[in-house]
Image: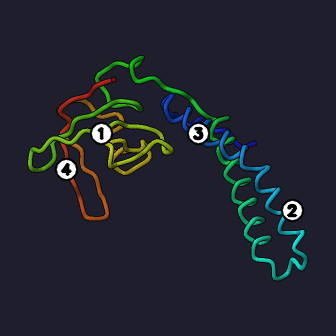
């Protein structure tokens, strides 16, 4: 029997998934109406509206199933409840790059990751390299552009 892997996420990520699920479930009846309306136009073999509505229905149902799976496996973690001297999920880390420029990242779940806002997935190359590291440790990360080196200068749980 397969084991169900928990999916760590912040409350914010859980709330966003719940909101997306609600929105998609509200869209379901609208899609059914669109299919019925397109079906009323006659010949389905050349009915682009019908095929588009059926395709959208498939996409929505697949997305709903995916979100429900993620929510059922969600393990909500509040960074404020964490402490310690190691980088863990939810930690906000300040790193010094090779030019001693500080960069700040929060380690989050896959659904919450957004590098532009300083949130990286624990599954990303940098996220995996950081987990378990301590203050003043050097971190080497292999990224598509080559190897990068960082020094952990601060670990916060905010």
Q: Secondary structure at mark 1?
A: strand
In-front residue for pair 72/37? 37
Q: Secondary structure at mark 3?
A: helix
User: Disc 2 vs disc 1: which is toward the camera?
Assistant: 2
Q: Quadrant of the N terminus?
A: top right
User: Disc 2 vs disc 3: which is toward the camera?
Assistant: 2
* Residue at the extreme left: 99
Q: Which residue is mark 3?
A: 17
Q: Which residue is mark 4?
A: 149
- Which of the two labelled residues, at mark 4 and mark 2, occupies the earlier sequence position? 2
- Which of the two labelled residues, at mark 3 and mark 4, occupies the earlier sequence position? 3
Q: Which mark is residue 105?
A: 1
- Classify 54 as above or below 31: below
**Crowding near the residue tagged with mark 4, few <14, some 14–19, many ≥20 C-alpha atoms within 10 Å:** some
In space, the residues marked 2 and 3 are separated at their CA atoms by 29 Å
The reply to whether discs 2 and 1 touch (Cβ–Cβ < 8 Å) is: no
């Amino acid at each position: 029997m397969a084991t169900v892997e928990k999916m760590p996420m912040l409350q914010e990520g859980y709330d966003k998934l719940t909101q997306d699920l609600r929105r998609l479930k509200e869209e379901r009846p609208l899609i059914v109406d669109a299919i019925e309306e397109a079906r009323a136009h006659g010949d389905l073999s050349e009915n682009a509206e019908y095929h588009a509505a059926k395709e959208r229905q498939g996409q929505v149902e697949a997305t709903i199933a995916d979100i429900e799976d993620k929510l059922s496996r969600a393990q909500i973690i509040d960074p404020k409840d964490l402490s310690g001297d190691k980088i863990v999920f939810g930690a906000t880390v300040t790193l010094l790059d090779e030019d001693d420029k500080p960069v700040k990242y929060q380690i989050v779940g896959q659904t919450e990751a957004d590098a532009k806002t300083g949130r990286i997935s624990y599954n990303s190359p940098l996220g995996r390299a950081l987990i378990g590291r301590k203050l003043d440790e050097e971190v080497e990360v292999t990224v598509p552009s080559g190897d990068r080196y960082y020094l952990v200068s601060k670990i916060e749980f905010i």
